[in-house]
Image (cartoon, coloured by chain):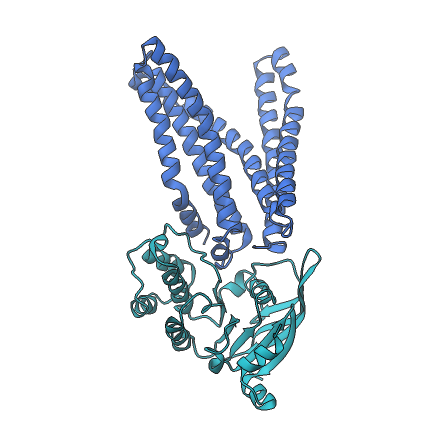
């Protein structure tokens, strides 16, 4: 098997009496695009926060290229949160400058190119941008890094179908060879073709896990149809 | 990385703190002109209120920045940066000390501006710029900063602790405030207990005894401050590293 970039072993997370994650285990190798799929409240964001060291209080083992989530792993992971994390008084150029200063793998020229492609104004303050533009800016900052692992939390949740294609192509065109993507979403139909592997998360547990193509031929259904079947109310 | 973090932290609130410092100095400039009785009474109230409000505002700004920048939405960015929890905390601490000293400087400037009525500023500066005065002021500044540090860290510890209880934020806030208050009270109480004995000797002893006693009391005070700093810093870093629960 290729190099393991992310190893998640028996991870559980409890919020009070609620189990947000229960014994979640999987690996992600190099050159894979992995869909982390599940409805709202299934534990996707919790798992992503653990991988990015934003939740430290959990049970089990997580390793990013051999590093426990922390200072070293953050050099290797490019993370797109599901909320606006940048201070809104910064200008777009200042946000680029911030990433350029802190991340040695950040490519400023690439970031400028992506901002032009996505038509994000560089001289505006972030607070003056629309929500959609803010999300595009976050995506640019994330994808302009040459990271080993890209962790994208709901990158297409808040955008219209037309913008979805642009966002997906931005992701696919800009991730580095030898790296991998873990992309969480509950909107499957538009993105299922890009996944090499999928992980279905249901009530904090891995419900289904495997190569997307194998699952399609095994069940004779698309990933979207499988998702609807697994998660039907 | 620490220098980069400090620069970033300074940019978050510099406008607000510089405005407050400018306001204090402005008060120092206009105060001597308030010679009409009714106006003087009015201005006295304004000055009192301002001097009560500014420190509260400063503390509030620092608390708000620490809470929002590390445990609010901006925390998703700050904790994604390739820096350690201790660097994040140290950066916040150094930045707060810079603001604290800026406000102290503004307060000293305010007093100097008030004194210009009795003594021209140039004479005041000449009198102040002697080695003895500067050395005394630096020593006092060190002591003030050393005693401010555990208090700032206790507040940071309280905020960090309040975020641990994810499901019950109100309970978390209560424990955060209570722990910070107890930490500060304990620090002040121990300082008073260990520093109080010097006054007996100061009253009774000769100059040499006084000098040695005061130096010993200051040394003990610095040591206590260092112990409390290490304790509060350690607890806060532990929470940020091992018990972090960003909402």
**Where's residue B187, x and y in %?**
63, 32
Q: Is residue A164 left or right of residue B36?
A: right
In the image, residue B210 sits, relative to residue A119, either above or below, namely above
Quadrant of the rendering where the C terminus of chain B is positioned: bottom right
**Where's residue B184, x and y in %?**
61, 33
In the image, residue B54 sits, relative to residue B208, either above or below, namely below
Q: How many marks?
A: 0
Identify the colour of chain A in the image: cyan
Name the residue: 59% across, 34% down. Answer: B225
State the residue lying farthest toward the top.
B37
**Where's residue B145, x and y in %?**
51, 33
Q: Is residue A3 visible?
A: no
Q: Is residue A203 visible?
A: yes
Depth check: give the residue in front, B226 or A188.
Answer: A188
Quadrant of the rendering where the N terminus of chain B is positioned: bottom left
The chain letter of the blue chain reads B
Q: Quadrant of residue A104?
A: bottom left
Q: Quadrant of residue B44?
A: top left
Name the residue: 53% across, 60% down. Answer: A71
């Amino acid at each position: 098997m290729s190099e393991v970039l992310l190893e998640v072993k028996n991870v559980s997370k409890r919020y009070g009496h609620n189990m947000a994650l229960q014994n979640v285990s999987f690996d992600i190798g190099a050159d894979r695009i992995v869909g982390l799929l599940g409805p709202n409240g299934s534990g996707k964001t919790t798992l992503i926060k653990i991988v990015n060291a934003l939740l430290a209080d959990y049970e089990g083992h997580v390793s990013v290229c051999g590093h426990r989530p922390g200072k070293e792993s953050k050099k290797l992971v490019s993370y797109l949160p599901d909320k606006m994390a940048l201070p809104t008084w910064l200008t777009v150029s200042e946000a680029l400058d911030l990433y350029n200063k802190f991340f040695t793998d950040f490519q400023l020229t690439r970031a400028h190119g992506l901002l032009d492609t996505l038509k994000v104004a560089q001289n505006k303050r972030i607070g003056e941008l629309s929500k959609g533009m803010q999300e595009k800016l976050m995506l640019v900052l994330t994808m302009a890094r040459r990271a080993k692992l890209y962790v994208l939390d709901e990158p297409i949740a808040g955008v219209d179908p037309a913008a979805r294609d642009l966002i997906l192509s931005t992701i696919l065109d800009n991730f580095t060879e030898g790296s991998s993507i873990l992309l969480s979403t509950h909107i499957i139909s538009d993105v299922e073709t890009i996944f090499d592997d999928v992980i279905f998360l249901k009530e904090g547990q891995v419900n289904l896990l495997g190569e997307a193509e194998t699952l399609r031929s095994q069940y004779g259904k698309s990933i979207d149809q499988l998702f609807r079947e697994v998660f039907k109310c | 990385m620490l220098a980069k973090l400090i620069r970033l932290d300074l940019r978050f609130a510099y406008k607000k703190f510089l405005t407050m410092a400018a306001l204090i100095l402005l008060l120092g400039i206009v105060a001597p002109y308030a010679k009409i009785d009714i106006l003087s009474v009015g201005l006295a109230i304004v000055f009192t209120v301002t001097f009560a409000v500014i420190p509260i505002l400063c503390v509030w700004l620092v608390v708000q920045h620490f809470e929002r920048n590390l445990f609010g939405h901006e925390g998703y960015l700050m904790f994604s940066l390739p820096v350690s929890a201790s660097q994040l905390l140290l950066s916040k601490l150094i930045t707060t000390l810079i603001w604290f000293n800026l406000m102290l400087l503004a307060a000293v400037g305010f007093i100097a501006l008030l004194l210009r009525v009795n003594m021209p500023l140039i004479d005041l500066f000449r009198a102040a710029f002697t080695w003895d005065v500067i050395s005394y002021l630096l020593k006092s500044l060190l002591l003030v900063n050393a005693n401010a540090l555990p208090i700032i860290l206790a507040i940071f510890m309280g905020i960090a602790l309040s975020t641990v209880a994810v499901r019950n934020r109100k309970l978390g806030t209560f424990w955060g405030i209570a722990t910070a208050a107890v930490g500060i009270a304990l620090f002040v109480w121990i300082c008073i207990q260990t520093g109080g004995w010097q006054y007996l000797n100061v009253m009774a002893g000769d100059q040499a005894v006084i000098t040695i006693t005061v130096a010993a009391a200051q040394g003990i005070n610095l040591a206590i401050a260092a112990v409390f700093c290490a304790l509060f810093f350690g607890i806060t870093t532990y929470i940020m590293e091992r018990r972090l629960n960003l909402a």
